[in-house]
Amino acid sequence: MAEPTTKRVTSADVARVAGVSRATVSYVLNDTPRQTISAGTRTRVLDAAARLGYSPSAAARTLRTGRSDVVLCLLPDWPIGPEVGSMLSQLSSALTRHGLTLVVHPGNRQERPMTELWKAITPAAVIAYTEFSDAEIAAMRSAGVAVVEAVPRRRGRSSAVPQELVGRRQAEHLIRAGHTHLGYAYPDDQRVRFFAEPRLAGVRAACVAQRLPTPVGLTVPLDPAAASDAVRRWQAAGVTAVCAYNDEVALAVLAGVRGAGLSVPADLAVIGVDDIPTARLADPPLTTVTTDQAAVGAHLAAAVVAVMSGRAAPELPAPDIVRVVTRGSA
Amino acid sequence: MAEPTTKRVTSADVARVAGVSRATVSYVLNDTPRQTISAGTRTRVLDAAARLGYSPSAAARTLRTGRSDVVLCLLPDWPIGPEVGSMLSQLSSALTRHGLTLVVHPGNRQERPMTELWKAITPAAVIAYTEFSDAEIAAMRSAGVAVVEAVPRRRGRSSAVPQELVGRRQAEHLIRAGHTHLGYAYPDDQRVRFFAEPRLAGVRAACVAQRLPTPVGLTVPLDPAAASDAVRRWQAAGVTAVCAYNDEVALAVLAGVRGAGLSVPADLAVIGVDDIPTARLADPPLTTVTTDQAAVGAHLAAAVVAVMSGRAAPELPAPDIVRVVTRGSA
DNA sequence: CGACCCGGGTTACACGTGTAAGTTTGGTGG
DNA sequence: CCACCAAACTTACACGTGTAACCCGGGTCG
């Protein structure tokens, strides 16, 4: 290794070949409004920069301005599926259009210092899918970081899709089809309870609204035999339709029904959440509630730029975004 | 907004309350090997820092040292599933243990300046799942950025799981079960061809090695009817077993077989890739090839630290990581 | 006893950028 | 002809760190 380590090309280099001062380069490249620059030098600077392949140091810029153009998205520990993936992709595009750079930090178990992360990166904004303490959020805000909470909390403003609505839509679909005794298939993964609980609450609320009995909740592991047990218990309780936490759990219920020698939807109707790619491949094809992830991504981006400029985050048009996809299972 | 904008606590603040110079603070906090510090001042500095809640500015540090402790993982446009998610989670943990911070940038369509990203962030290392030009890789290397290529290319060193091996394992499993006429179920998504092609090549290689006819490749959309067409064509061609690009495609084939009034594995055996959660919930449960994502994550982390310290990246023990999970479908 | 060294610090500079405050023009009104 | 001004720049400083180079007091050795 000869290690020539080609030095970074700085704005000073650009200034030199353009024959102007470094400040002028800065003014041109950021086209600072208060400063007037002649057309001649402007083009000289511009193509000097292009020729040298100059791109400014984010570190230096961040240090100087105190704020970077990075938007940090903090994901929790739970398994991220394709929906999250496509949402992030959309979000990234939308933020790029506003000159911001999305960067995602996947949560991992033994990571104490989530605090250090944002203090270190000094992002322009943080999109928090993880639960933060109010104190910490206040700390971020007072440090000038725009915070958008995307975690589905019951109280307070949040830019997340209200998961109660998702559960409500599931239940309403089943109730409209004539079912009166509902079940809820709870996931066998502690990490997703932040999502599961509000969804279940939504199902309960729909039952209450229609004066139906409380849904019978059972935990359903992703295992055919265990799912069959759950199905038999629902059967014994007179349940004719279940809302599943998500499509995976729903597919487990399908497998459970099959294993118990029964059939869907005749003996038990099933509705999932997410519309994963394999939902339509199930037997019968899975009815499910989907949320428009592209819209969520776009909205999150809008919320970020709004909060960054001091305005309040826009309201998420949740009712338009959460849709039932009717297939064979319910 | 009163905007008090609480100022960042800097090492100068720590120095002041500890009653030492700023340099001493730096020496203590980074415990610089060449500098000896008395136990007394060390503790004074340490708990001054703790009391003030000091955490150093990554921007300033990066500016000074010319290198950050951020590892940038560039994902391509394709849909990321739970496997990628868990791999990233593992990778993040492993890197954290080495004092590095993983940061993921999801690819999005209209994003020209992938170049600008790494020039701006000045990461310590880049894990490239996207295809880079050799020139660009050279540029990154000469800028002092450690590059780990994780894209499955045929030629050259790569830290990725060799996708040929995955295909080979699929085919070998089917051949061992007595099948001689294989099919390959190709995904209906152009974006994943970087993965699909080497897998198909692996299947072909296995057939060649056993002097079997070339596998019959068909594109299988994630749609039951279209999948049934493909199944009938395989049937007509005398194919008795198919390797699917991944589990989703495999589930489509399962649905296709069902739709054609046939049965798995009697009429057609099917094997997938990934072992997604719903694979075992299918009817019949899906036989599949899984790669140990935790091991991949750990290896990638090891490769990063190796390359960063100038050593060559370790060899990935691929044969131990890629395993067949035998269930009912093959 | 002087030379020397070494532990335990401090002072000073550099990293690359944004921007407020100055400086030189050429033009213009009085 | 002088005062003044706007345009078009340049000079100078600050952001928060890491680290090389210097400094000082006290022990050690010849």
Image: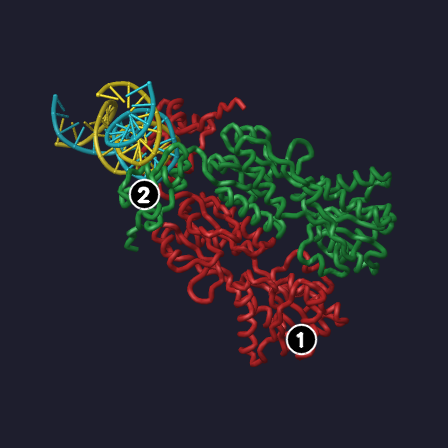
Chain colours: A red, B green, C yellow, D cyan
Which residue is the site of mark 1? A234
Q: Residues within 10 Å of mark 2 (few under 14, many from 20)?
A: few
Amino acid marked by disc 2: Gly
Residue at 42%, 43% in the rendered image: A69
Amino acid marked by disc 1: Trp
Instruction: Name which quarter of the figure residue B261 lies in.
Output: bottom right
Residue at 51%, 45% in the rendered image: B97
Image depth: mark 1 or mark 2 in front: 2
Q: In the image, is B321 to the left or to the right of A312?
A: right
Q: How many marks?
A: 2
Q: Nearer the viewer, residue A252 or A206?
A: A252
Q: In the image, is B35 to the left or to the right of B206?
A: left
Q: Residues within 10 Å of mark 1 (few under 14, many from 20)?
A: many
User: CB under 8 Å between callouts 1 and 2?
Assistant: no
Residue at 39%, 60% in the rendered image: A134
Residue A193 position (above or below residue B304) = below
Separation of residues labelled 1 and 2 (CA atoms): 67 Å
Residue at 31%, 44% in the rendered image: B14
